[in-house]
Image (cartoon, rainbow, N blue to C red):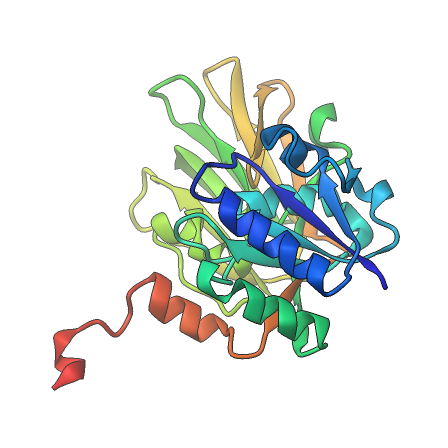
Amino acid sequence: MEAIAIHGRGITETSLPFIKKTISFLDRNRVPVLISKSLKHDTPGIFDQYGSFTDSNDLKDCKAILSLGGDGTLLDTLAIVGQTELPILGINLGRLGFLATISKDKIEEALEAFISGEYEIENRTLVQLTGAHEFLVEKNYALNEFAILRKDTSSMIVVKSYLNGEFLNTYWADGLMVSTPTGSTGYSLSCGGPVLMPTASNLLITPVSPHNLNVRPLVIPDSATLRFEVETRDKSFLISLDSRSSSIDSQIQSFEIRKADFFAKLVKIKGDTFIDTLRTKLTWGLDKRNYF
């Protein structure tokens, strides 16, 4: 039987019992288990009897990887998986959980469905960055968004934007992001962007606190290529891909963003739908008039 890998981070006393429950279930069903070295580090002496992994090279014989934590843990899991497209099943031991949607009380139910083959794989679009600093060469992709942000100053940054080579707009703002449909419920949403269905063939350009209030988020086809040129009074600015960020010298000014040529493959258990997640996580439909 193919192994299942398990990754978690920032393990707390309240989340540890659910991790043990997950591994015990797999043991009872005779499913081989691999545990990330970072999870072992956070739980010294508890899971030493299991094999471990560090990166995607150690996961060639695995059927899937379980992400035990919140959405940040799932993004971290994706960074480990990389371009291998190993399916990821997110179990929510955190708070909101737009990506890790399996709740604590449904762990065994979800694992039973997965082992029985009662699941679907949902391809989630990634964005890929070129023309950036060396730190992003190996992991130059994001599931949620790519962002350009001001750093350590009250001054705005100026971002000249080009869509398929044609000048689009100059954004005077605290920053600018390109979000995937998956990322539309994250940072982009908090900056006034729309919610997209996760399988939509679109990307979002969303300004962060724009100086011109008539500049609004823009939905574009995910076949487009975007180029950005940055101007700032500061010596540096920030760029980020999901939770990975770095300071960039202001002399490095040009970046290109396009849809990646690989996907994040998220495991969706029967009954686990995006519409239900929207209602639950964004408390849609809680108007008291719905109950009379």
Task: Single out the residue that lies furthest toward the top.
Answer: 235
Residue 215, horizontal then vertical, whole percent: 37, 49
Quarter of the figure that contains the N terminus: bottom right
Q: Can residue 146 be seen at all in this image of the molecule?
A: yes
Name the residue at 48% across, 71% down: 274
Residue 59, horizontal then vertical, whole percent: 83, 48
Position of 153 relative to 61 (above/below): above
Task: Single out the residue that lies furthest toward the bottom.
Answer: 292
Q: How many marks?
A: 0
Answer with the quarter of the image where residue 133 lies: top right
Relative horizontal placement of residue 2, taking residue 267 as reference (left or right): right
Name the residue at 40% across, 35% down: 172
Relative horizontal placement of residue 195, taking residue 83 as reference (left or right): left
Residue 159, horizontal then vertical, whole percent: 50, 35
Relative horizontal placement of residue 224, taking residue 64 as reference (left or right): left
Residue 10, horizontal then vertical, whole percent: 52, 34
Name the residue at 64% across, 55% down: 24
Answer with the quarter of the image where residue 117 lies: bottom right
Name the residue at 62% across, 27% down: 253
Position of 60 relative to 102 (above/below): above
Q: Nearer the viewer, residue 49 or 247?
A: 49
Q: Can residue 128 be seen at all in this image of the molecule?
A: no
Q: Nearer the viewer, residue 224 or 57?
A: 57
